[in-house]
Image (cartoon, rainbow, N blue to C red):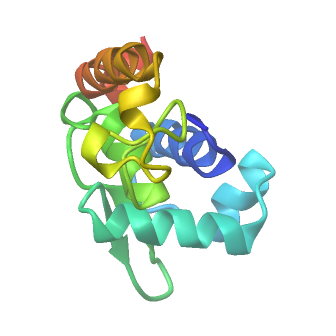
Amino acid sequence: MLITRASEYAILSLIVLTKATSAVDSDTLSKQLSIPKSFLAKILQALAKKGILKSYKGVNGGFMLNKDPKDISMLEIMSAVEGKAPTVFDCSPSMQDCPKDKAVFCSIWPFLHKLQGKIDTFLADLSLNDILE
């Protein structure tokens, strides 16, 4: 699946954080976006771990963008929260790694591979800033 709930919630959270003038805690974001707090906390930590967000501890703690929105790609966001690059189909990126060892007989693999490449390029070129406009 290309866009999971985690990716959707990550993008929604980042949109809110682009408008914030100070750190926003996960509880506030959770309430504002109607996202379960424990799920959102994991997403925000994953984004912080990849350097997309900066986390602050303490009473006034929370999260802020660590990069300019124009320097954060959708591919980077989705890969951070999913733990791997998003895929359209559960198809191997190379014929040699086909889990069913039938890639040479698969007539749609070349099409799926080409489609995935175009989607990867599109997501890499689409920034957080682009979706704010």
Q: Would residue 30 appear left or right of 93 to someone viewing this image?
A: right
Q: Residue at x 73, y 69 (%)?
A: 37
Give x and y (percent) for residue 69.
28, 34
In the rendered image, the residue lying farthest to the bottom is 58
Q: Nearer the viewer, residue 3 or 67?
A: 3
The N terminus lies in quadrant: top right
Q: Nearer the viewer, residue 126 or 13?
A: 126
Q: Would residue 47 appear left or right of 125 to someone viewing this image?
A: right
Q: Residue at x 59, y 71 (%)?
A: 41
Q: How many marks?
A: 0
Give x and y (percent) for residue 79.
37, 50
Relative to residue 21, is residue 130 depicted above or below? above
Q: Would residue 62 appear left or right of 76 to someone viewing this image?
A: right
Relative to residue 105, is residue 41 depicted above or below? below
Give x and y (percent) for residue 10.
53, 48
The C terminus lies in quadrant: top left
Residue 11 visible in the displayed image: yes
Give x and y (percent) for residue 105.
44, 27
Q: Residue at x 47, y 57 (%)?
A: 81
Q: Residue at x 29, y 22 (%)?
A: 117
Relative to residue 128, is residue 31 depicted above or below? below
Residue 94 visible in the displayed image: no
